[in-house]
Image (spheres, grey):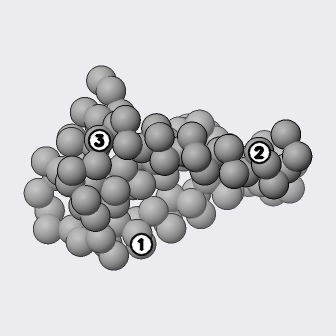
Amino acid sequence: MSIQQLMWATAYIKDGHTLSDSLVYAMSELGELSDEIMIVEGKSDREAGVDGVVGEAVDVIVCMLDIIHKADPTVCENDIVNIAKAKIKKWQSKAGA
Ligand SMILES: [Mg+2]
């Protein structure tokens, strides 16, 4: 399954969720990701979850794909890659890479 298909798949979730609902869910997933990273870095005594850092990061990505598709259904995988490339290039230039 491609990123494009994952994005389309979120559109088939017919539970009436809105952009803000997706954002709130994403924030919750970011909290779960934060917990997992704190555990991995030894900054938390909690037990690691089944999903771990990678699974929680994917949860966040899925939420972001849903938000992107909801915000603009015409956006395709290639658009996302091109936008990401520009963002990474900017990050690299700021980091002196
Ligand atoms: Mg999660």
Label 1 residue SS: helix
The image quadrant of residue 92 is top right
Label 2 beta carbon within 8 A of ligand 1: no
Q: Earlier in the sequence, mark 3 or mark 2?
A: 3
Mark 1 vs mark 2, CA separation in Å: 30 Å
Q: Earlier in the sequence, mark 1 or mark 2?
A: 1
> Which residue is rendered at x = 24% and y = 71% of the image?
18
Mark 1 vs mark 3, CA separation in Å: 24 Å
> Which residue is rendered at x = 50% and y = 58% of the image?
29
Kindly identify which residue carries mark 2: 92
Relative to 61, 9 lies left or right: left
Q: Nearer the viewer, residue 48 or 62?
A: 62
Looking at the rendered image, the disc whose residue lies closer to the viewer, 1 or 2, is: 2
Mark 3 is on which residue type?
Cys
Looking at the rendered image, the disc whose residue lies closer to the viewer, 1 or 3, is: 3
Kindly identify which residue carries mark 1: 24
Q: In the image, is residue 23 above or below residue 5?
A: below
Mark linked to residue 76? 3
Relative to 24, 69 lies left or right: left
Relative to 92, 26 lies left or right: left
Mark 3 vs mark 2, CA separation in Å: 24 Å
